[in-house]
Amino acid sequence: MYPEDLRARVDAALERLRFSAAPATAGLEEAMRYSLLAGGKRVRPVLALATARSLGADPERFLPVACAVELIHTYSLIHDDLPAMDDDELRRGLPTSHVKFGEDVAILAGDGLFAEAVRLVCEQPGDPARVLAALRELSAATGVDGMVGGQYVDVAGEETDAEGLRDLHVLKTGRLIAASVGVVLTLEGLGKPETIPYRRFASELGVLFQIVDDILDVTESDEQLGKPRGSDERHGKLTYVSLFGLDRARRLAADSHVKATEALAGAEGETGDLRRIADYIFTRNA
Amino acid sequence: MYPEDLRARVDAALERLRFSAAPATAGLEEAMRYSLLAGGKRVRPVLALATARSLGADPERFLPVACAVELIHTYSLIHDDLPAMDDDELRRGLPTSHVKFGEDVAILAGDGLFAEAVRLVCEQPGDPARVLAALRELSAATGVDGMVGGQYVDVAGEETDAEGLRDLHVLKTGRLIAASVGVVLTLEGLGKPETIPYRRFASELGVLFQIVDDILDVTESDEQLGKPRGSDERHGKLTYVSLFGLDRARRLAADSHVKATEALAGAEGETGDLRRIADYIFTRNA
């Protein structure tokens, strides 16, 4: 079972966030909250809280940084959906931000979410040097050598083989998933050997997430996905399925799931939640 | 005379910045550097370094945070120029980012610059608690209650009077200019009374900057501006000139210049550079 108690805490914390201090910017906040509160499993912030619990720390204390990761993820979805990028009109069964609010507001809603994410991390309780190190990790996972760079590689569309595909996804999806776990390790000030099982787990989880995403894009109905099926194919994107076929992609997902859970074996804490998140990602159907 | 020695240090530091760690993202770095190194007076980072020098600190030490402000400013220009926003094709005499690299890459170049700006501040030497406070100030100046919010108010286009216009510019331009000075005060750990003259100066400078911008948009040639003249009018924007007429706008600029320099009188340090930056902003012709 997915750790729904942690998801509920994340949802409540996201719901409480306010960004606008003046009536003139209320419409921007509305657009930001529209995408932020559109639901979803909250995999990244739940991973952060589950990591905290696994280390024996109170998850509640990590809500600012966990929410910040979700803001960054939401910002990336809004920008990815733009007409100049993937040009998607539906996300989680709802009109995408630019369809609902216009392209200009959608761009700014993404920009605003990223700025507010940084501000949130600055409010994270803890030793300032560790908070700063966590923010360094998170901004690196977001920038050119992370999510934004991965999105660039995706639109540039020059990857043609398995290695290129894996590199793309490590940047585009993997770094932020890894950072969801990593920032908590950093905030707890763990030494390198203790963090290795967690970091190995998180990095494999990013791979697993993407293989399953590619599989679902060809196997699930539009309603289940909340967006039109086959959009990767429509965009001519290289995927695990187009590269290896469906059967082989399913075996790769199973291997990756095994690797992720095996990595946890070396962790000292209680890793049940983290394993259940990996199970969810492996078996999800949307 | 504008403090050209500080500008030279900023330009050299910006030139040294590298963002991409893999060949696949080299094209993104190229787009980011294209806009970042397109020139300009570097008003914001020079303000930061001039503030440091005024406080008797070595400007060199503040280069990371000063460059970060310029990255954020550049990111805002790239996104403002997009077809969905102001749809401008020229900036500083060069094709804008989306004209040169395509809209998708331009969006990502802006996103990347912001992420790398945050990362740069995380590298800023100094007491971590102060660095974190400076980053809080900078992200607040960038977010919904700052630059991004101001850009939203601008595209929403609902401001109709002098107060609305001033509020818009305080957010869109003023907060980041104020933060250019503010982050250095914060990093130096100054107490509130000592910072008041500097903060008052910086906040007035934002107003001055915008009035002069509005005047130049109707008085200067395309070549001097490096972009088509009269673009505010074309976009139907409310400006200091459309609201008050050219003569009154010029008097407002002169008043604002006096207020800015008078604010400095209360500062304890050597404020010559700061005054010369205000003079430059008041008398510039591009």
Image (tube, coloured by chain):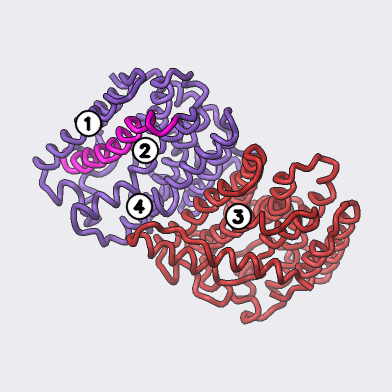
Chain colours: A purple, B red
> Is A219 located above or below residue B21 in the figure?
above
Q: Is residue A268 something that shows in the picture? A: yes
In the rendering, at what x and y percent does residue B3 appear?
75, 69
Q: Does the magenta stretch include residue B234?
A: no
Provide residue B145's location: percent of width, then percent of height.
64, 44
> B69 and B217: which one is in front?
B69
Q: Confirm or deny contact between disc 1 and disc 3 (CB under 8 A).
A: no
- Name the residue tied to disc 3: B64
Whether residue A211 is in magenta: the answer is: yes
Quickly name the residue at label 1. Answer: A282
Q: Which of marks 4 and 1 is nearer the N terminus?
A: 4
Q: Which residue is labeled 4 in the image? A: A150
Q: Write down the residue under mark 2.
A: A178
Element under disc 4:
helix
Point out the stretch of residues depicted in magenta. A191-219
- Kind of element beneath mark 1: helix
**In the picture, residue B230 is in which quadrant?**
bottom right
Image position of B165 (left or right of A260): right
